[in-house]
Image (spheres, grey):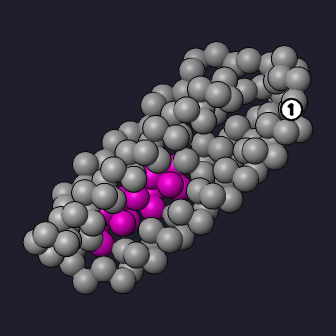
Amino acid sequence: MGKQLFVQLSEFEKFHYDQLIRLENSLEQSGDYINYAWKEFPQPPLFEIKAAQEPNTKNVVSIISGAIEQEKQAEKSYTEQASQSMEQKGHDMFNRLAEEEHKHYRILMDVYWNLNNLGTWKW
């Protein structure tokens, strides 16, 4: 379950990266912001898996803690970029990126809480 979650998060971050490259190219070529093609995070599985099956629970929790911090930093960075953007498209894009990072943060917080308190992989 943890691998599935982190694969989904990494695919989402790759999507963000691709969108930021599109933005950079557009700004360099024409000085225009792009229309950000946002996407939704996949729905969580409908079942729970007991974390007791995970042999390295402490390591998993520390990895999740690190990921939580990364999502907080990304949200903060995008929020700052939104506040500095002079164009509405740029403002909207960076606000949306910040919202998506906040959603990732909430998902990871749910996983962290469920692993620590219920011993299950669930978000």
Q: Residue at x 45, y 72 (%)?
A: 79
The secondary structure type at the circle numbered 1 is helix
Depth order, front residue of 26/47: 26
For residue 46, what is the image quadrant? Answer: top right
Q: Callout 1, which amino acid?
A: Thr
Residue placed at 70% from the left, 37% from the top? 111
Q: Nearer the viewer, residue 77 or 22?
A: 22
From which residue to which does the magenta span run?
91-103
Does 28 appear above or below 36? below
* 98 falls in the magenta region: yes
Q: Which residue is mark 1?
A: 57
Name the main secondary structure of what is drawn in magenta.
helix
Q: Residue at x 52, y 41 (%)?
A: 10
On the image, the x and y values in percent for residue 20 come to 33, 59
Q: Is residue 17 left or right of residue 22?
A: right
Q: Position of residue 23 (x, y in %)?
A: 25, 63
Q: Is residue 12 visible?
A: yes
Q: Report crowding for label 1: few under 14, some 14 to 19, many 20 or more residues within 10 A (C-alpha).
A: some
Q: Position of residue 53 (x, y in %)?
A: 84, 17
Residue 113 in view in this figure:
no
**Above/below status of 67 relative to 114:** below
Q: Quadrant of residue 116?
A: top right
Pick the front one: 39 or 16:
16
- Numbered label tally: 1
Q: Quadrant of the C terminus?
A: top right
x, y (%) of residue 4? 59, 26
Q: Is residue 54 left or right of residue 99?
A: right
Is 57 located above or below residue 72 in the figure?
above
Q: 8 left or right of 91?
A: right
Q: Could you tell me which residue is drawn at 34 percent across and 42 percent down? A: 39
